[in-house]
Amino acid sequence: MNAHTAAPVFNGTFPHRWQAEILPERPLILPSRHFVYPREAEEVERGALEVLVRPAVAGEQSQPKYEQEFLATCALGFHDPVVPTGLWSTPNPAEICAVSGGYAYIIDTTAPERFTMIAYRPVLELRPLAAQGLLLFVGHHSILAWGANGQAWQSGRLSSEGLTITGIEGDVLHGLGWNLITDKEAPFDLELKTGKRQGIENRE
């Protein structure tokens, strides 16, 4: 990885039906299956995250067998150690979330041509919530939640620039967001089931 990007991390909070390895560089001999994310990116190889993925065969529960591996080339977002890079399991055991310099890609390992690129450019933090079955993506202004069936919700604007999760109690997320008008941090409470702010009418 580039010296100006964060060291890759692995978070396997959610059970997953795949194996994956971040490669130090693209192999000289490519696997027969190679997918580039996003497809329309130009010069995607420059600084990209190269991940070798082995999906499990459906139906194997006790000791899964693995199908033919594929190489996932994930375009780099930012050369900045502040933004995350690495691999996360998701609420859907067949999906893998690969993050390259704050650009987050959720890939269906059983059909790698199917993927979703999270809208935030960049994602600043990922927070797995096993009890709620959600993987949270934190951006500069709002939070997006990914569940077993895809995007569960996206909050409204919580901050003028930058937000912090301060705690989670039951199905409520507590955080701080910067208020540009008052030039101060303001607390907010978010319902994890809906993504709505507590005590504030929906103004979206």
Image (tube, grey):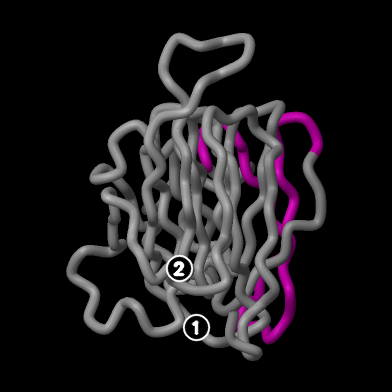
Q: Residue 57's image quarter? A: top left
Residue pictured at 60% horizontal, 61% vertical: 86
Residue at numbered disc 2: 103
Crowd tier of the residue under label 2, counting other residues whose Cα lies within 10 Å: few below 14, some 14–19, many 20 or above: many
Q: Answer yes or no: do the residues labelled 2 and 1 have beta carbons within 8 Å?
A: yes
The segment highlighted magenta reads 169-195
Residue pictured at 31% horizontal, 62% vertical: 37
User: Compared to 122, does 89 lie above or below?
Assistant: above
Determine if the magenta segment contains residue 99.
no
Residue 155 visible? The answer is no
Residue 107 numbered tag = none
Label 2 vs label 1: CA separation? 8 Å
Percent of width and height locating residue 20: 55, 47
Residue type marked 1:
Phe
Q: Locate the N terminus and report the quarter of the image it occupies.
A: bottom right
Residue 75 visible? The answer is yes
Residue pictured at 50% horizontal, 56% vertical: 98
Residue type marked 2:
Tyr
User: Compared to 121, does 170 lie above or below?
Assistant: above
- Look at the magenta stretch and give its main secondary structure: strand
Between residues 170 and 52, which one lies in front from this camera angle?
A: 52
Residue at numbered disc 1: 78
- In the image, farthest residue toward the front: 29
User: Compared to 203, does 121 lie above or below?
Assistant: below
User: Compared to 105, does 94 lie above or below?
Assistant: above
Between residues 140 and 188, which one lies in front from this camera angle?
A: 140
Crowd tier of the residue under label 1, counting other residues whose Cα lies within 10 Å: few below 14, some 14–19, many 20 or above: many
Between residues 36 and 165, which one lies in front from this camera angle?
A: 36
Percent of width and height locating residue 97: 50, 49
Q: Is disc 1 placed on a helix, strand or loop?
A: loop
* Mark closest to the chain's N terminus, 2 or 1: 1
